Amino acid sequence: MTADTQPQRPFLVRADQAESLQDGATSLITLLADAADTAGALTANKATFEKGSPGAPAHFHTKATEMFLVLDGTMRFLVDDEVLTLEKGAFLSVPPTVPHAFAPAPDSTAEMLVVFTPGLHRFDYYRLLERVYRGEATVQEIRDSSQTYDNHYFESPQWQASLAEAEAAAVSAAR
């Protein structure tokens, strides 16, 4: 039996034991549970964003639903071709194949719980993001891993326009 087919058991990770990864200058991913930890039931992480973080670009998954709970601050999400603003306490569930992206709202820090179900082996993907940030891996390696980690990126004119509008509003408010 593999870890994904064994009976589920309770899984606990304490805050001081969780691995945290710097995946960009303004964001942090705290690894909570990977598919192997939950017999394939889910994968979970906490994402922390400083003001101005680019968040995650437009992408979709084919094998799992991705769920977001905004723990603090305000987040902006692309869902299909609509941009939503979600505040602390809001919950969003994005089914497989639905395009999405996310970033903190202008002038906001934010924190989210992110859960995939069924679980995907994603911790090595997050570690790859950190290696790219540190200059130890390339963006091409992220592109090449899209099938492995079920992360499929694409260009979204709606998301790019939304980011440009948010940046312009932040600059205008700062004046």
Image: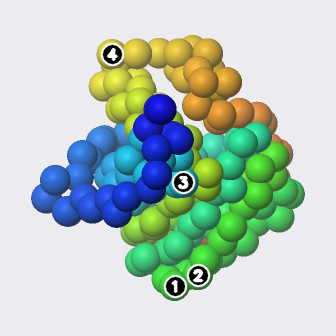
Which x, y percent locates residue 114? 50, 60
Residue that badge 3 annotates: 41
Cβ–Cβ under 8 Å for marks 3 and 1:
no
Residue that badge 2 annotates: 90
Label 2 and label 4: CA atoms lie apart by 36 Å
Tell me the element at label 4. loop
Which residue is drawn at the image coordinates 47% and 15% (left, top)? 138
Tell me the element at label 3. loop
37 or 122, nearer to the observer: 37
Tell me which amino acid carries mark 1.
Answer: Gly
Q: Earlier in the sequence, mark 4 or mark 1?
A: 1
Tell me which amino acid carries mark 4.
Answer: Glu
Cβ–Cβ under 8 Å for marks 2 and 4:
no
Q: Which mark is residue 75?
A: none
Residue 34 position (above or below residue 71): above
Which x, y percent locates residue 122? 49, 38
Cβ–Cβ under 8 Å for marks 2 and 3:
no
Task: For residue 163, say whether it is visible.
Answer: no
Quadrant in the picture for residue 16: bottom left
Residue that badge 4 annotates: 136
- Among all residues in the image, which is located at the extreme bottom? 89
Q: Earlier in the sequence, mark 3 or mark 1?
A: 3
Tell me which amino acid carries mark 3.
Answer: Ala
Label 2 and label 3: CA atoms lie apart by 23 Å
Residue that badge 1 annotates: 89
Label 2 and label 1: CA atoms lie apart by 4 Å
